[in-house]
């Protein structure tokens, strides 16, 4: 990689600079949400968020995967530092970054590449969200005075039951995906609901927007609101149908993930079946772990034969047999932390 001015920031400097980048991203997000056109800087320039590219020399259609972007490029070469290439070009071919150059190489200065000039602005990697509930976009900020289990019963389950209506899913998931894109969240790991039809709508919204995600059809056959309680057989059948729907798709950015909501909402039979599906189709797993002390105690009551919460998932091949994301993990013992490591 070659550039006019190149800075390397170590971990300490990275923390300070990332705070600035996050502020910039938040400002851009707010501007996008309000206007979908541009965010102004002190100098009076603007950064286009959703408008078409000014492309006088390049004519490749948007979404072709061939793109050249000029600006102050932030390149994250590892977890402890990042590099900044001032006034440089980042080039991607078929969606794969080829490199960063101070001057655009001749082979990319063709009509096959869309060109976007953001001189004077940071061009940063997309954000990744490893745990988000798409249906809860409709209840942002509601019931935050509740503890977890009461919050689920009094707020969340009623909202999620509404996703039995595909029209409601179209409305909420469309707004949710727009917000992800506006905030620069290009990759995410997402909980849907138990409703396979609505989960498919979420998948299509993500594909249309060009975002990458793992999307899970949620599984719940125990200790749940009546409107969200599936039969074990139907839960497994709908999950397998959801997984199979991705087969043969040209879009590999959006993929399925096995999603038992959490241990209390799943019977042993259901978790056994989900473990088998994960293995058969080589699909990753996501769930919740030790988010709340009452939740942890409840799991112990339901499965007293296991010393630790995570061991329940592990017993049903839902903990590390395929790539696994466990959300929260707040109330862990040292032994549990060691097991996760």
Image (tube, rainbow, N blue to C red):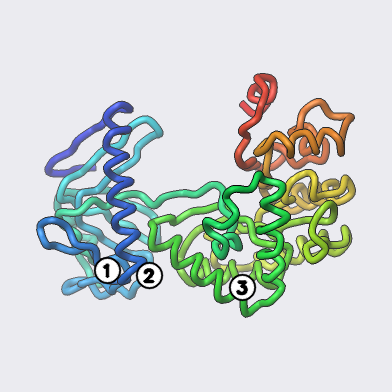
As drawn, is 301 to the left or to the right of 213?
right
Task: Report which quarter residue 318 is drawn in.
Answer: top right
Which quadrant is home to the C terminus? Answer: top right
Report the number of numbered marks.
3
Query: Where is residue 149 shown, x and y percent of the image?
Result: 71, 47
State left or right for residue 226 relative to residue 185: right
Residue 176 is tagged as: none
Which residue is tagged 3?
Answer: 169
Q: Position of residue 204 (x, y in %)?
A: 57, 71
Q: Which residue is drawn at 30% across and 58% down?
A: 28
Mark 1 and mark 2: Cα distance apart in space: 8 Å
Task: Confirm or deny contact between disc 1 and disc 2 (CB under 8 A).
Answer: yes
Which residue lies at the image location 71% right of the left edge and 57% below the top edge?
218
Q: Which of marks 1 and 3 is nearer the N terminus?
A: 1
- Looking at marks 2 and 3 on the same chain, the residue that comes earlier in the sequence is marked by 2
Q: Where is residue 317 in the image (x, y as percent from the top left)?
A: 78, 40
Mark 2 secondary-structure assignment: loop
Q: Name the residue under label 2.
A: 64
Mark 3 lies on a secondary structure that is: helix
Q: Kindly report which numbered mark, 1 or 3, lies closer to the viewer in this rendering.
A: 3
Task: State the residue at coordinates (28%, 70%).
Answer: 112
Q: Residue furthest left?
A: 43
- Residue 195 position, x and y percent, is 72, 67
Residue 114, numbered circle: 1
Dot 1 falls on a residue whose secondary structure is strand
């Amino acid at each position: 990689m070659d550039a006019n001015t190149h800075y390397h920031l170590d971990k300490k400097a990275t923390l300070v600079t990332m705070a600035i980048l996050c502020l910039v991203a938040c400002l851009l997000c707010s501007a996008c949400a309000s206007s979908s056109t541009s965010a102004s800087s002190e100098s009076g320039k603007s950064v286009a968020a959703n408008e078409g590219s000014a492309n006088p020399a390049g004519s490749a259609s948007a979404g072709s995967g061939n793109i050249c972007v000029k600006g102050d490029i932030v390149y994250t070469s590892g977890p402890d530092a990042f590099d900044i290439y001032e006034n440089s070009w980042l080039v991607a071919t078929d969606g794969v970054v080829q490199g960063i150059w101070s001057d655009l190489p001749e082979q990319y200065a063709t009509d096959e590449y869309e060109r976007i000039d953001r001189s004077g602005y940071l061009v940063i990697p997309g954000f990744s969200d490893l745990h988000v509930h798409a249906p809860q976009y409709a209840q942002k900020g509601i019931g935050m005075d509740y503890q977890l289990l009461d919050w689920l019963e009094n707020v969340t389950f009623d909202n999620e039951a509404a996703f039995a209506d595909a029209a409601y899913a179209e409305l909420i998931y469309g707004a949710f995906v727009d917000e992800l894109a506006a905030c620069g969240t290009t990759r995410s790991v997402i909980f849907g609901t138990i409703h396979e039809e609505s989960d498919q709508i979420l998948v299509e919204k993500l594909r249309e927007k060009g975002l990458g995600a793992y999307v899970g059809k949620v599984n719940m056959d125990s200790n749940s609101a009546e409107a969200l309680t599936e039969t074990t057989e139907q839960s497994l059948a709908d999950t397998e149908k959801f997984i199979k729907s991705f087969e043969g798709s040209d879009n590999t950015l959006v993929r399925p993930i096995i999603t038992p909501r959490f241990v209390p909402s799943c019977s042993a039979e259901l978790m056994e079946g989900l473990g088998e599906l994960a293995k058969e189709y080589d699909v990753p797993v996501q769930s919740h772990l030790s988010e709340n002390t009452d939740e942890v105690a409840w799991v112990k009551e339901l499965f007293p034969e296991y010393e630790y919460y995570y061991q329940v998932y592990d017993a049903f091949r839902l903990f590390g047999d395929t790539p696994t994301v466990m959300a929260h993990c707040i109330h862990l013992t040292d032994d549990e932390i060691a097991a996760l490591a």
